[in-house]
Amino acid sequence: MAQIIIRNLRKDFGDFTAVKSSSFTIEEGEFFMLLGPSGCGKTTTLRMIAGLELPTSGEIYIDGEDVSQKPASNRDIAFVFQMFALYPHLNVRQNISYPLKSQGMPKRQIKAKVAEVAKLLGIEEILHKPVSGLSGGDRQRIALGRAIVREPKAFMMDEPLGALDAEFRERMAEDLRALHDRMGATTVYVTHDQLEAMQMGDKIVVMNHGSVEQFGVPQDIYDWPATIFVADFIGSPSMNFLHFNGSVNAGDSAVALEGQVFEIPTQLQSCEGEIVFGIRPEYVSFDQNSLYRGDIIAAEYLGTTQIVTLQSRNGTLKSRIPSAEPASVGENVGLAFNPRAITLFDKKTGAALLSEGNKGVLDNG
Ligand code: ATP
């Protein structure tokens, strides 16, 4: 299993830059997510790691070896695509053994390896069946089996669950993660689904327009978004953004809105002009003593909780509170924000206003 280091990786297609100077490290045995909206450069990054695309500049190290300009065949990496292509005229066993046969491995050894992989994937009973007519989930397992049987240094997966329906997708995601935990194989996984990335990933790189916006463990990315883009992309409903014009001084650890002072969990960098005050819906509660107020404009019942939408002087915001709490449309309420969960951003740059001392939380790349 491999450690993969990406340094200043860039890919140009003509005069279009699909990936701009990306740097991050994938540790041995990690389940690593490349996350971002369509077209942000996830697949191009994955293809460069696998050697299916050569970088314009920058380096890729696999287990300390610079493979940047080496072809895929020299990297020993297995690729699992969304459209899992299987050989329809072969049965399950033949599909899984295919890569070993091409390597010229002796038959007895192939049989033992296929049996081991089939057990790992729970597909021993269907080894004799033709692949045509099997369910999407089984076909995905077979595609995985074909990748696993080679015992590559790492797995690259490009939206492998994208073709499955929602319910099955969730089950397969759990299966994949459990399989990874049993094998401990370095896996790089592309998805545009933030929930999938949070549920499955040991670490996440969030990409936008070809750039790495943030790199870290899911909880840090959720709790300490480095940019407005990340704060907005991660979480459902996403973070609330309240806009105000003003200034904060370096080292400040409180900010006032409408005369209400809010303590914040870190010291700030200085900023002047348009500032964005970020708070996630689950940290917004009602407090009649607060000077910061909003009008309730909608309440959406979700069983144990409700999402209440409010209009404040600085924009609309959502609060996730217990359903039992009264919230009537038209009511004016005071608002409290959990001080540990407030983030401020510079609107111009989109970056979080953390002081250098606190930035270590984010700069784990
Ligand atoms: P998606 O989830 O939609 O595949 P992605 O984040 O994986 O998105 P990429 O497939 O890496 O994005 O593409 C990034 C950008 O590079 C896109 O604008 C795409 O059109 C462009 N691109 C990718 N491959 C090529 C190519 N061979 N030639 C020209 N442009 C390309």
Image (tube, rainbow, N blue to C red):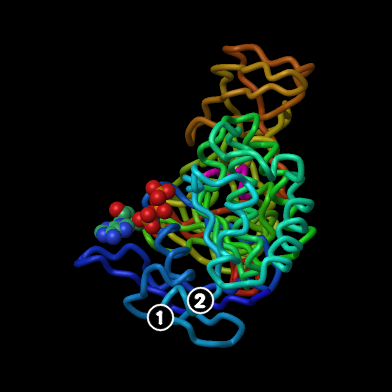
- Residue at horizontal 37 percent and vertical 69 percent from the top: 53
Q: Tell me which numbered mark, 2 or 1, is placed earlier along the sequence.
A: 2
Task: Answer with the quarter of the image where residue 59 lies.
Answer: bottom left
For label 1, the residue is 58
For label 2, the residue is 6
Place of residue 169 in the rendered image (x, y in percent of width and height, measured from the top left): 62, 36
Q: Is residue 45 above or below residue 289?
A: below
Residue span colored magenta: 193-197
Assign the N terminus to one quadrant of the image.
Answer: bottom right
Task: Answer with the quarter of the image where residue 91 lies.
Answer: top right
Q: Is residue 109 above or below residue 94?
A: below
Q: Tell me the kind of residue under disc 2.
A: Ile
Residue 195 in the magenta stretch? The answer is: yes
Instruction: Identify the residue at the far left of this view.
Output: 15
Residue 160 in the magenta stretch? The answer is: no
Residue 348 in sight from this viewpoint? no
Assign the C terminus to one quadrant of the image.
Answer: bottom right
Q: Check whether the beta carbons of the residues at disc 2 and disc 1 lie within 8 A of each other.
A: yes
Q: Secondary structure at mark 1?
A: strand
Picture mark count? 2
Place of residue 75 in the rendered image (x, y in percent of width and height, measured from the top left): 52, 77
Residue 321 in sight from this viewpoint? yes
Q: Secondary structure at mark 2?
A: strand
Crowd around label 2: few <14 · some 14–19 · many ≥20 (10 Å): many
